[in-house]
Image: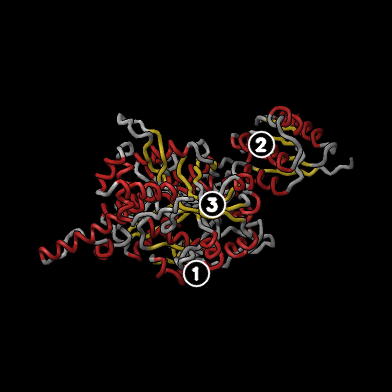
Amino acid sequence: MTTPKQSLPEDDQLFRLLRQLDVASDASQRATAQALGVSLGTLNNHLRAATEAGLIQITERTGPDRRQRFAYSLTIRGAAAKVRLTDRFLAQKRVEYAAVHAELTGTESGFLSITKRTSLMQSNLSPIPELYVSYDSAQKLKHEAGELPSWDLSPRQVCDLELLMNGGFNPLKGFLSEADYNNVVDNMRLADGTLWPMPITLDVTEKFAEAVETGQDIALRDQEGVILAILSVSDKWTPDKSHEAEAVFGADDIAHPAVNYLHNVAGPVYLGGAITGLQQPIHYDFRARRDTPNEMRALFRKLGWRKVVAFQTRNPLHRAHQELTFRAAREAQANLLIHPVVGMTKPGDVDHFTRVRCYEAVLDKYPASTTTMSLLNLAMRMAGPREAVWHGLIRKNHGCTHFIVGRDHAGPGKNSAGQDFYGPYDAQDLFKAHQAEIGIEMVDFKHMVYVQEKAQYYPANEVPEGGTVLDISGTELRRRLREGLEIPEWFSFPEVVKELRRTSPPRSKQGFTVFFTGLSGSGKSTIANALMVKLMEMGGRPVTLLDGDVVRKHLSSELGFSKEHRDINIRRIGYVASEITKNGGIAICAPIAPYTATRRAVREMIESFGAFIEVHVATSV
């Protein structure tokens, strides 16, 4: 005869049970029953139900009272349930307090319900939910999580997880379920109808997915093995990536960096579920400039900033940007938040270390007490219109009331046919259509140009008649930096130009990679050796030859010749070549690299630091 399954107690009783077990896990059952005011029989029923639900577990007794053989403690799932029930309990007590206060005094209390407090405190300044548990709970959960299956997060996944945990992606409570994912992809909304334009999913390998079942908890680790969070897996599915690319990015074209990532980097299986945050990712750089949404809201409250316009950027700031942002803040009668992205951006962008030093230099050019800056660890998708709406929601969570949306906002450039992926005003149009629901007002990005006769910047549509317009495009700026040419002071600040020249030296001083590829016996190694000797004869830069056979012997001796192992070997060569290039040297590579996607990944890895020259050796063999 089987024991009937026990049902969980009501939320109030469950909250008291979980709280009691958390603070006194080693107490006897009699003491626990007395503390809760229930009989031993009722307590046993509640313990059995909570154990079956995976909220508590039986552990060895460690206290002095050894008359009982075991004790109960909270599981990871139980700790998360306790946090949720605590929030509900506190909200209920606030309502009860307000009612009693009104009955006794005839006036509303200063400590109001959440709804009434929100009506008195600007919504952009009140705290938002985070997914972190307390420090003590986190330490317990980390110890338990050491026994769980664990997933090592990619750099993009670390960015996503950080913004999930700190409230930057509010109202998300974790990685999207399959139902939420499908609705976001097709309709830009969660399954409950809430506006959310970007699928936030945990992609994993097929091998890892096979070992994970729904209902299971997994530990999420950073690249150094530190456990950052627990994912309670609710969904596991294989997505239609081509459909995702078409719906979210507008085209299934790997010329789009996010589509290339989707097909050639992201895992084939998605996991969804609630997140229990244990600690935020560790950042060693610019720590004083990294703020959570609630920290930004607290800063705005402290400064008395009731209206804040945010400026998103992934590029260095020049004089036109300074003029544009100051005008936008003045028109909105708001203060200004410079909110640059320092997570993953577009391949080939200026590194964030250089950009932040540039931002610091420009910050002093704004009038005192009008502007601040905070760094956002966001992994951009370059999704144009959808990304603009996404950026608006993120800035709303950070306490901003206005957001500058630019021409071709978050555009990735040209597609495979040489055409722009998105129209120049698509992002502004989509944002305008949803700005009331987002809860943040759009400020148009006005293209600023320099008028020579007036010696100042004007919006392009307000240039005085007969004025001489001067402008330097991003392509022209890169050419001037590459060739060591003058960059006029009307275009940028001397401090910014100095920083850019430090990290973008003239081409004659940059490192580069020559990547020979071709069939075995085609002559790659012979040509590579001849080139190495010639370059060493010329001098000026250190030269390193990364021959395929030599690398196989010293770096990849454990690998075979399957597609997976060939890809690993080529990526290792690419990584070493990128380090050589970054430090001003010449890397000559001569592997067999038959797969286009892998060569593209190596190119992107290297072009952040210098030139990449691919040479296909197609001699007859």
Left or right: where 20 falls relative to 415: left
Residue 504 in percent (x, y) is at: 56, 42
Q: Which residue is mark 3?
A: 214
Q: Residue, x 53% and y 65% (percent of image)?
A: 183
Task: Answer few, some or many: residues within 10 Å of disc 3's Cα (few below 14, many 20 plus, some between 14 and 19).
Answer: few
Residue 325 in percent (x, y) is at: 40, 59
Label 2, secondary structure: give it: helix
Q: Nearer the viewer, residue 1 or 269?
A: 1
Q: Nearer the viewer, residue 576 or 98?
A: 98
Q: Earlier in the sequence, mark 3 or mark 1?
A: 3
Left or right: where 25 falls relative to 312: left
CA distance for labels 3 and 2: 35 Å
Q: Residue, x 40% and y 36% (percent of image)?
A: 59
Q: Which residue is mark 2?
A: 572
Q: Residue, x 33% and y 60% (percent of image)?
A: 124
Q: Amino acid at mark 2?
A: Arg
- Number of numbered discs present? 3
Task: Answer few, some or many: residues within 10 Å of disc 1's Cα (few below 14, many 20 plus, some between 14 and 19).
Answer: some
Label at residue 430: 1
Point out the frontmost of discs 3 and 1.
Answer: 3
Q: Amino acid at mark 1?
A: Leu
